[in-house]
């Protein structure tokens, strides 16, 4: 998008935005959209990952593990912290920047919630503590959810009243190198009979990386602060709509065989981890209260949802973004733990043996 087009509905002066990281999955979309809105962007990273991605953007070299001197002597309106899950990094960065930055955005995770079975899951729901996570305070390694929750508290403690916490669920879109979502377009693109988990009405909550990052930049412009679930849309999409939508943008001859939750549980196929995206309808993990569409300066609503503004489910990593690094058909998935997906190919055969437990279309 040309900057002049992107800036049309922005009011107020351009912001100075510091992004910690900025060259991974989420960061580049934040950078591009912020630049398109006319803001000044500075990156702070080690200069190792995609180092030449933004040659015209100011990049300060350092390390979150205490080497922060490059940040000294400047001021920013907003800092966006995309760090994975390290409370010490958040504490050190927030302490270093507390007098030179107005607001702190921390990208957390829905995994920070101690109990995801609540319905609805509002942003006020309790997050993990050492006690509820069953982890000793002197533990050398922290579970992901606890680390995120502790990181949130560090930012809120240091930037009192000046913190935005965003808790995304599953983030999808171009440049996503994981198989958390791309399993489905890859499998459906191959064609044939596809095992579909649960019931077509089971809801899923996913968000496109572009919608999430655009919403964050617009939130920075409005000055809103608070804690938000980074999911959408307001009415969760059923997995049937997702899978049939993927099939609609492929040329493959594909049919779905819906296998119920009880049978999948009996044969050891786990929701979400073995069957990406899907959670059985009785679980609360897909019931997070979504982002509310706060209005940007000129009145245009933010775009926090996948498919909420005519985008549909055609934002598929390898189908709609040629040349990206997302998984093409036939790629071997290399992420740790994805042996379960190889097992799914066998489960498709096993599951079809119990025809009374399956519904085929």
Image (tube, helix red, strand yellow):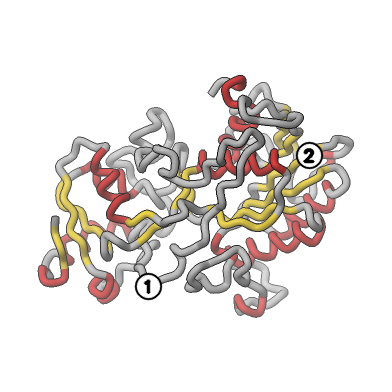
- Badge 1 marks a residue whose secondary structure is loop
Q: Which mark is residue 313?
A: none
Query: Image point 15% across, 63% down: which residue?
Result: 359
Q: Say which residue label 2 marks.
A: 77
In which quadrant of the rendered image does the C terminus lie? Answer: bottom left
Residue 282: which numbered mark, if any?
A: 1
Where residue 218 sits in the image (x, y, percent)? 63, 39
335, 167: nearer the viewer: 167
Residue 343 located left or right of residue 350: right
Q: Out of 355 and 288, give the one closest to the viewer.
A: 288
Side (left or right) of 293 relative to 188: right
**Callout 1 environment at 10 Å: few (<14), some (14 to 19), or many (20+)?**
few
- Across and down, in percent, residue 216 comes to 62, 43
Q: Residue at x 52, y 61 (%)?
A: 289
From the viewer's perspective, is 69 left or right of 249?
A: right
> Where is residue 360 drawn, in percent x and y?
14, 59
Q: Is residue 171 above or below residue 32?
A: below
Look at the numbered discs 1 and 2 and tell me whether their residues touch, using CB distance below 8 Å. no
Residue at image x 36%, y 46%? 182
Gap in angstroms between the C-alphas marked 1 and 2: 43 Å
């Amino acid at each position: 998008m040309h900057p002049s087009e992107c800036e049309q509905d922005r009011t107020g002066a351009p912001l100075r935005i510091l992004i910690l990281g900025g060259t991974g999955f989420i960061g580049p979309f934040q950078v591009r959209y912020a630049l398109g809105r006319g803001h000044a962007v500075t990156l702070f990273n080690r200069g190792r990952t995609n180092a030449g991605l933004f040659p015209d953007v100011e990049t300060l070299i350092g390390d979150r593990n205490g080497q922060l001197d490059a940040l000294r002597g400047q001021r920013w309106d907003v800092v966006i912290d995309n760090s994975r899950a390290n409370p010490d990094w958040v504490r050190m960065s927030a302490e270093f920047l507390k007098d030179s930055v107005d607001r702190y955005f921390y990208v957390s995770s829905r995994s920070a919630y101690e109990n995801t079975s609540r319905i609805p899951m509002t942003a006020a729901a309790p997050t993990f503590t050492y006690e509820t996570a069953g982890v000793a305070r002197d533990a050398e390694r922290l579970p992901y959810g606890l680390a995120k929750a502790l990181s949130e508290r560090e930012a809120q403690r240091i930037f009192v009243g000046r913190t935005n916490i965003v808790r995304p669920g599953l983030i999808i879109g171009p440049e996503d190198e994981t198989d958390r979502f791309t399993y489905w377009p890859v499998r459906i693109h191959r064609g044939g009979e596809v095992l579909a988990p649960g019931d077509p009405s089971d809801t899923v909550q996913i968000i496109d990386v572009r919608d999430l990052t655009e919403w964050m930049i617009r939130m920075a412009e409005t000055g809103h602060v608070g804690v938000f679930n980074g999911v959408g849309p307001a009415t969760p999409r059923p997995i049937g709509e997702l899978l049939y939508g993927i099939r609609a943008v492929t040329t493959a001859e594909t049919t779905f065989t819906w296998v119920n939750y009880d049978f999948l549980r009996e044969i050891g196929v786990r929701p979400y981890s073995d069957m990406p995206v899907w959670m059985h309808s009785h679980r609360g993990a897909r019931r997070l209260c979504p982002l509310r569409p706060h209005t940007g300066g000129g009145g245009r609503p933010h775009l926090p949802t996948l498919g909420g503004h005519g985008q549909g489910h055609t934002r598929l990593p390898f189908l709609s973004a040629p040349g990206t690094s997302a998984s093409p058909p036939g790629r071997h998935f290399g992420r740790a733990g994805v042996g379960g997906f190889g097992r799914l190919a066998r489960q498709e055969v096993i599951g079809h043996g119990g025809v009374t437990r399956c519904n085929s279309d």
